[in-house]
């Protein structure tokens, strides 16, 4: 076998970036397919973080002022850092499906806390609900990310990521539509109707039951014929050490600021919406921004799956498009919040200057979605084995939670809510560009070795003196045509 015909890869066969045209498709049963499982995962995402996002997309969880809700969200994300770190241990004992079910349980109590605060002025249940949400949500985030990366065929992974994340935004679309219908005549600042929360609680309570419908990894059928391996076999202590070692690798540490600039923005633009817009304008923003984010997110996912375009080109063009657009949006937002700090406006859609203030919110929401999807793409490229998918997913979500804990915590302070959050996020964006490029520039390096016909079946070549899959190499053998 010549060098032009094969390439040694460190990646497990189920994770290789192969051309769809080079794969001999296998028949699958619909209820075992990756599309079915992506749909179940998406419905779980809708019922749990999707509805959570719907509440936050109303601005301050629908409350008149953002400070209590931002404090509660900071508590949630602090606990999620811990639960994300230990999620691979829990997955070892209850499996990835069990971890997903466990992760959906804590969301409804948080919605109940917002309901009692909105209707009766109760504050303690908001914090208790936030704590319960943080304990379960960290596990949910790590589990769903691992499933979304490991279950699909390589040539469908970007589309599945976009499809799955669409369901999270469906929660925001639903929340915005419900709230807009209930508050269409309210052109002043204030909190939303408590009736909205009754719907949200009911929807979040369905999460665990929907998660029961997910296939276990060994039951999934992929059109490329590869079996899904998604389990942890290490002893718990060894697994924790493996997670810690993965975190301190140079490639992951270089991406910490990119993850930060991507997710720090959520508290920033939700707080921006709650401070400077009327109730019905906030509802409109929730609805319209989600529709736009769904559209652009799926476009990016489809582009990242275009295996006819070299991985090097796909990754670089996507990255530079994202950071260029994001930079422009942060400049716009910086100018606006600096002015608002002094003028103290409340914009309604009938107000003069509404469009100039409203459009940056839409852009920042779109930016959050495409940055978010690109973070998953980065983790998928870094992962060499199914075990690493679980670890990278947990570390991504844990790092994300840490940044969001800082973001929501700082945005519970007046000066950061009004201007500081935007300034900090702008700075994070600038800091993140070079380190991310140092990682991303290596993506697609094997393509030049494999030649234009790269793709096909991957056979195990051997190991470096160990049976551990982390150390195994695979030879790429072109399909017969």
Image (spheres, helix red, strand yellow):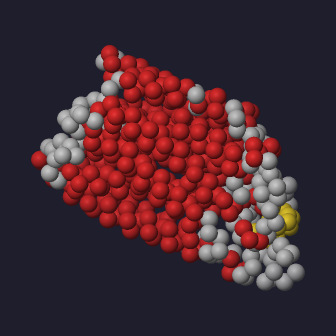
Q: Quadrant of residue 418?
A: top left
227 relative to 422 in the view: left or right: right
Which is more toward the observer, 381 or 150? 150
Q: Name the residue: 26% across, 48% down.
A: 420
Which is more toward the observer, 15 or 359? 359
Q: Quadrant of residue 460?
A: bottom right
Residue 137: % across, % down: 54, 35
333 relative to 98 in the view: left or right: left
Q: Is residue 336 visible?
A: yes
Q: Name the residue: 83% across, 73% down.
A: 479
474 relative to 335 in the view: left or right: right
Q: Quadrant of the C terminus?
A: bottom right
Q: Quadrant of the N terminus?
A: bottom right
Residue 395: % across, % down: 58, 48
The relative height of residue 200 versus residue 424 in the rendered view (above or below) is: above
Residue 135: % across, % down: 54, 30
Residue 427: % across, % down: 33, 58
């Amino acid at each position: 076998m010549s060098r032009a015909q094969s390439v040694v890869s460190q990646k497990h066969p189920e994770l290789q970036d192969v051309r769809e045209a080079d794969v001999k498709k296998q028949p699958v049963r619909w209820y075992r397919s990756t599309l079915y499982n992506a749909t179940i995962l998406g419905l779980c995402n809708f019922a749990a973080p999707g509805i959570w996002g719907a509440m936050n997309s109303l601005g301050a969880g629908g409350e008149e002022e953002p400070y209590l809700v931002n404090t509660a969200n900071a508590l949630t994300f602090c606990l999620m850092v811990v639960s994300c770190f230990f999620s691979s241990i829990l997955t070892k004992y209850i499996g990835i499906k069990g971890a997903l079910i466990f992760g959906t349980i804590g969301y409804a109590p948080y919605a109940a806390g917002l309901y009692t605060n909105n209707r009766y002025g109760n504050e303690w249940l908001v914090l208790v609900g936030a704590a319960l949400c943080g304990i379960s949500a960290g596990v949910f985030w790590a589990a769903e990310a691992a499933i979304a990366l490991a279950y699909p065929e390589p040539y469908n992974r970007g589309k599945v990521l976009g499809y799955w994340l669409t369901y999270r935004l469906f929660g925001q679309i639903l929340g915005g539509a419900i709230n807009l219908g209930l508050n269409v005549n309210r052109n002043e600042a204030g909190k939303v109707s408590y009736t909205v929360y009754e719907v949200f609680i009911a929807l979040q309570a369905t999460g665990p039951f929907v998660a029961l419908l997910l296939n276990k990894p060994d039951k999934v059928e992929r059109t490329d014929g590869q079996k899904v391996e998604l389990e942890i076999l290490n002893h718990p202590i060894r697994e924790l050490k493996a997670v810690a070692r993965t975190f301190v690798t140079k490639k992951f540490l270089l991406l910490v600021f990119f993850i930060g600039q991507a997710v720090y923005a959520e508290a920033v633009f939700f707080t921006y919406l709650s401070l400077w817009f009327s109730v019905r304008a906030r509802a409109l923003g929730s609805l319209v921004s989600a529709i736009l984010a769904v559209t652009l997110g799926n476009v990016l996912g489809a582009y990242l799956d275009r295996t006819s375009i070299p991985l090097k080109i796909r990754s670089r063009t996507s990255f530079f498009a994202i950071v260029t657009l994001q930079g422009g949006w942060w400049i716009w937002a910086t100018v606006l919040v600096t002015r608002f700090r002094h003028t103290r406006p409340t914009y309604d859609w009938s107000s003069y200057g509404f469009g100039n203030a409203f459009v940056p919110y839409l852009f920042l929401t779109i930016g959050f979605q495409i940055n978010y999807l690109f973070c998953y793409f980065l983790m998928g490229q870094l992962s060499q084995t199914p075990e690493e998918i679980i670890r990278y997913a947990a570390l991504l979500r844990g790092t994300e939670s840490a940044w969001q804990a800082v973001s929501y915590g700082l945005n519970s302070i007046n000066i950061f809510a009004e201007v500081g959050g935007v300034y900090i996020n702008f700075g994070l964006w600038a800091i993140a560009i070079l380190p991310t490029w140092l990682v991303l520039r290596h993506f697609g390096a094997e393509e030049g070795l494999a030649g234009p016909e790269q793709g096909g079946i991957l056979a195990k070549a051997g190991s470096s003196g160990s049976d551990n899959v982390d150390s195994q190499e695979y030879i790429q053998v072109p399909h017969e045509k």
